Amino acid sequence: MAAYVLRRLLGAVPTMFVIVTIAFFMIRLAPGGPFDLERPLDPLIMQNLERAYNFDKPLWHQYLIYLGNLAQGDLGPSFTRRDFSVVDLFRVGLPVSITIGSLSMLIALLVGTVLGALAALRQNSWVDYLVVGTATFGITIPTFVIAPILSLAFGVMMGWLPAGGWGTWKHMVLPVVTLSLPQIAVVARLTRGATIEALRSNHVRTARAYGLPTRVVVGVHALRAAMLPVVSYLGPAAASLLTGSVVVETIFGIPGIGRYFVQGALGRDYTLVMGTVVVIALFVIVFNLIVDILYAWLDPRVRYD
Amino acid sequence: MTEHVLSEQVEEPASLGAGRSLWQDAWLRLRSNRAAVASALVLLLLALAGFIGPWLVPHSYDQIYPQYVRVPASLEAYPKQDRIVPDFQSALERARITIGDVELSGSVVRAPVSDDEPLDPRITRYVDRSDLFDNARLQDADGNPLAEGASSGFMVADVQRLRFLFGTDANGRDLLARILIGIRISLAIGLLASFMALALGVTYGAIAGYFGGRIDNVMMRVVDVLYSLPFIFFVILLVVFFGRSFVLIFIAIGFTEWLDMARIVRGQTLTIKRQEYVQAAEAMGVSSAGILKRHVIPNTLGPVVVFVTLLVPKAILLESLLSFLGLGVQEPLTSLGLLIAEGASNMRGAAWLLLYPAVTLTVILFALNFLGDGLRDALDPKDR
Amino acid sequence: MLKSLMGATFLASATFVASLPMAANAQAEVVYNRGNDTDPTTLDHHKTSTVAEGNLMRDLYEGLVVGDAKAEVIPGVAESWEVSEDGLTYTFKLREDAKWSNGDPVTASDFVFAYQRIQNPETAAPYANMLYVMENAEAINKGEKQPSELGARAIDDRTLEIKLNAPTPYFLQLLTHQTGFPIHQKSVEQFGNEFTRPGNMVTNGAYMLEAFTPNDKIVMRKNPHFHDAENVAIDVVNWIPFEERATCLRRFEAGEVLSCSDLDSAQMDYMKEKLGEQVHVVPYLGTYYLPVKGEEGSKLKDAKVRQAISMAIDRDFLAKEIWRDSMLPGYSIVPPGIDNYPEPVHLPYKDQDILDREDEAKKLLEEAGVAEGSLSVELRHNTGENHKNTMTAIADMLKNIGITATIVEMEGTGYFDYMKNDGDFDITRAGWIGDYSDPQNFLFLFESANLGFNYPRWENADYDKLMTEASMINDIEARAKVLRQAEELFLKEVPAIPILYYSSGSLVSSKLNGWEDNIMNQHPTRWMSVAN
């Protein structure tokens, strides 16, 4: 197992290299630069700025400088937030993003599997229809509609929770709920489908025939099988929570890293964009690895050696 | 115990290509699924509304009514009764002539007008320009056209009745017409993006899976790399490079969504490759391209079709995220996502701008999801 | 000596920081949660350029002169000043009790250091040209002269002399801009690029930096060494960036922020109804205009065609319906209410009815040889809901005079880059908010040498000559006359069509006292207080 993990991690190095290279040249070839603002700068001042940030060097040279710094864990200075290095920004933003991301993932898993299993056990009853209906609803409403509505309802009208901002646990409730709603929906649907399938499978039928109580059959045998598609969904979902929280971060005013990505790309903050790409790619790679390991644990047919 | 059952299950022959046609069978099952059939009908209706609707509604999606900016949804025709007289007055004031009392009878407004010099017949345009009135004319007291050179008479105009069932937007355009065009664009983006993902993903996945070995390794590594590049990054750069256009948006979405498809198809292909009929074909010397076309790709279509029905709503939602970020389709065209994004910023004070597009999108996505579920149940060979 | 002195300073600031939490507990602090447009690019004011950054800098620093609550110039660090007869030399007398937040006195050399630093090419200050009026400034910024040759000199610790290239009637106003603020030499030299970090940053304004969490807030605490500290009522300001104006509105309604720096025009009607007096819409020193360029040989190169287009634009509709009164109809490049500009000029058809204007426009088009329906133009704009709606409405208005218009939307940074690089366009949009209240700050946009702002690359020798002439005149009346001639010429040629004047919109809680509406939209926290 350890050897497998090591091999996967080593295999990730060339992947990362390719990603960094593609991203570097793509963002650099985009028209405009970090100093193209609504108020144009004097050409002379622009020159001074470009010199200060090495933009006057050829692109390949800048690329080598970037790679060199990256190898030492230095993601460079941010262009649009010049009081911070990109690493500084992540030091502040990443814990925030991970907190709301993992909380909403956890809630989605708990609520989603329970709802999905319930629906599966009562297939084609009103419980089932209700769960499937709400789940579908959860997927169909864009977060940029749900977020302001929740903020308005619970923050402004009822005043139970802060309408926005960051600081206490109260500030987390609405963003986490908003983020988890569509995830709950997906998890519930996946669990429902997989549970139905598992309930019909031979080994669950046999277990039932042996007279094991339904609770045990469902809890141990069916759910275990049903977790497979959920687990394989988790990998990409976890990564998308980091970038996908752009909307929630903007609307609730949360200092996570999701916004850096869009702010960085739109403001041509090259280093910030590159930094986000690197962090997200790392997340994807690590999460896919975790998912594969979980998979092997859940499904004995899958083996890595 | 469990182990034993499991291995038994694994050895079950895959039922792909069994006696009764998979598709016939699926069709029968799908037809008996009421939710799926209803969804298909709803989708068909909405698609028709999107494609034919814009010609049927009285307003064009890009027609601006300056007097009707942000009017709420209403079953009654505009203008509201209490607006007619003041608006007629203010239209006439612009002509700088003396105006008497305005009277309104039925749908005709009338006001005595006079001036120091002969009335210029062209002053009717001040009234005609208003969205509220139509067919403005100068008449004498008996209702005959005013003689040339007269310096007093009556300005008469018909009240133009316009219906905005869903209200109007911030520019004074009919929201219903915009929703219809939005349905067209959103469905088109969803379908085209999915089709693109389908074509790319199936070809790529089938080739990788069928040839296996090093080719497979390299091809899947490319997929891994692309997987780790975030979607928004791609799209922002594409928009920056090529400007915003309808084509670009579906290409951008299709280009990011084919990866899952490639993985699924590859997995399927790996299984199919080991089937006897494929091996038989190989033994008979059929070319690789031939085998891919005849045996491999057709047999992967089951799960692929299911996946596509789920991809269409995903593409539509992604498009709406782009619109929220200000990277949507170009005016005066619009999409449901763009309408919702605009509606969300007008949520208070003009709730109809959010409500109707959001309901429309929800209905579409609901229908697509149920249809997808139905298809999956119908195509799922395990239940046979 | 120097060494021990520095040690002492360190110790002082260290004990001070340690005592903060205790002071916080001792009595209830007055906290002001204040909405700002965005986060700053940097807190190094020499590298700032935006309105949002200006707001922060006015709290952190005090210039030689400052704006009061109404943005009128009053003494700041300088208690008095003299101007030489030719208007070229300013001598400032600094107040004795001016101190940095670590207790150091503010001296004339702090200003000299700051003014030299901003012109130093190595600083790469985006707004260095604001102070090009100082002698040798431009040459230093170009690297042709040494920073020490700048026309700013400390005669003694409390006397500062500044020499100008030309009499500049708005010079004092200019000094209220953040580029005119001093900088703490010791901390800049000690910490280099990191001097703006909380703990390192030393400022001389009413507030000092306590914390900066990007995308969350900037915390400023009252500076105990500030000379007017006893009259500063608010202890802590939390500056919160709001990219989404609707978000600020919600937090304002929830009582979480006391003011928002901008209004969401989409919700204008709602706000006016629900929030009443707390909605402030005030004329602002800014113009929204449409540069017109066209390809070589295009009909748009004809001033008559441009004038016709200008005539056909119903500015009242744009201001009232599209911008929901958050803008005013505009008929000149220099906005109303500006200083040093009596009897402003306008487009002649300002008060004419739109239908009559359309008739005249059609006549002009005919004279220019443009048949109805033969001209089609592209309306280009950068991403923005209101820009989009404005262009959509204008396209519809142009239809009325037989011009077909299509709209092209471009993503922001790409758009600015395109304009900077002399990209082709027919008609586009631009907006300019004045940095100081003087017509020169608007009319200079279209000098032919001003490649950055002059999007249409309009070149008119007479215009340039008038602008140069005006820059030499000391008498305000005489100068205004020349500037008026320049603007009249501009409005006749309309290389850019003025359509709207900006208003500044703010939400100000009724609990917040001391917020005075003003045309500069400047509201330093030091003049405000919070009612319980």
Image (tube, grey):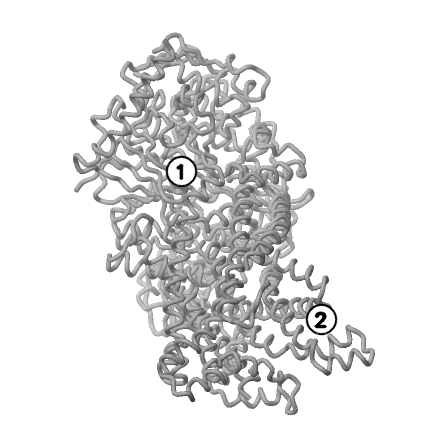
Measuring from the top left, give residue C173's x and y in whole percent.
38, 25
Q: Which residue is mark 2?
A: B210
Q: Is residue C321 left or right of residue B3?
A: left
Q: Nearer the viewer, residue C271 or C308?
A: C271
Spatial CA distance of label 2 from label 1 is 59 Å
Q: Are marks 2 and 1 in contact (CB under 8 Å)?
A: no
Look at the image and tell me in which quarter the C terminus of chain A lies: bottom right
- In the image, is residue C262 above or below residue C433? below
Q: Amino acid at mark 1?
A: Ala
**Can residue C371 be seen by looking at this rendering?**
yes
Residue at image x 52%, y 43%?
A272
Q: Nearer the viewer, residue C493 or B361?
A: B361
Q: Amino acid at mark 2?
A: Tyr
Q: Nearer the viewer, mark 2 or mark 1?
A: 2
Graded by Cα atoms within 10 Å as few (under 14), some (14 to 19) or many (20 or more), the crowding at tag 2 reads many
Q: Which residue is mark 1?
A: C52
Task: Pinpoint the chain carrying mark 2.
Answer: B
**Can residue B163 be seen by looking at this rendering?**
no
Residue at image x 41%, y 32%?
C43
